[in-house]
Image (cartoon, grey):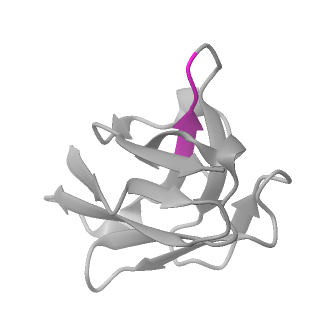
Amino acid sequence: QVQLQESGGGLVQGGESLRLTCEATSGRPFRSFVMAWFRQAPGNERVCVAAISYEGARVFVDDSVKGRFTITRDNAKNTAYLQMTSLKPEDTAVYYCAAGTRGTSRQPGLYDFWGPGLQVTVSS
């Protein structure tokens, strides 16, 4: 079992940056989990923005944010991050942190644990 809590969202203007933080609380080592960030805009499916493997050796980043978003993790701090730069209005969504044990994937069904989500709004 792992509990996840996101922070760092909010309202920004286009072109600005935000860093999302996901803190994990678990009886298992944080490195036991693949970590990912998903987002969901109203009326849309939940989509994987980025994922990072257990030790950070493998990273997936969706084409829609490639070059603008970076996922990292600090296993010593039980924390994953999503650095978002050059934000666009189309990045507006609820962002979710997720943890899984079945490999680095973009499929939401392979992640067993989810944070409550936080709103990111980018104005034009």
- Left-right relation of 59 to 118: right
Residue 56 among magenta residues: no
Residue placed at 70% from the left, 54% from the top?
A: 88
Q: Is residue 9 above or below residue 86?
A: above
Q: Residue furthest front?
A: 124
Residue 21 occupies which quadrant of the picture?
bottom left
Residue 108 occupies which quadrant of the picture?
top right
In the rendered image, the quadrant that contains the N terminus is top left
Residue placed at 45% from the left, 76% from the top?
A: 73
Q: Residue furthest top?
A: 43
- Left-right relation of 102 to 59: left
Q: Position of residue 41 (x, y in %)?
A: 58, 28
Is any part of residue 104 visible from this angle?
Answer: no
Q: Residue furthest bottom?
A: 76
Q: Which residues are magenta?
A: 38-42
Q: Is residue 38 above or below residue 44?
A: below
Q: Position of residue 116 (x, y in %)?
A: 28, 37
- Left-right relation of 77 to 93: left
Q: Position of residue 101 (x, y in %)?
A: 47, 48
Between 42 and 95, the one nearer to me in the picture = 42
Q: Position of residue 13 (x, y in %)?
A: 56, 60
- Left-right relation of 41 to 114: right
Between 28 and 119, the one nearer to me in the picture = 119
Q: Is residue 61 above or below residue 124?
A: below
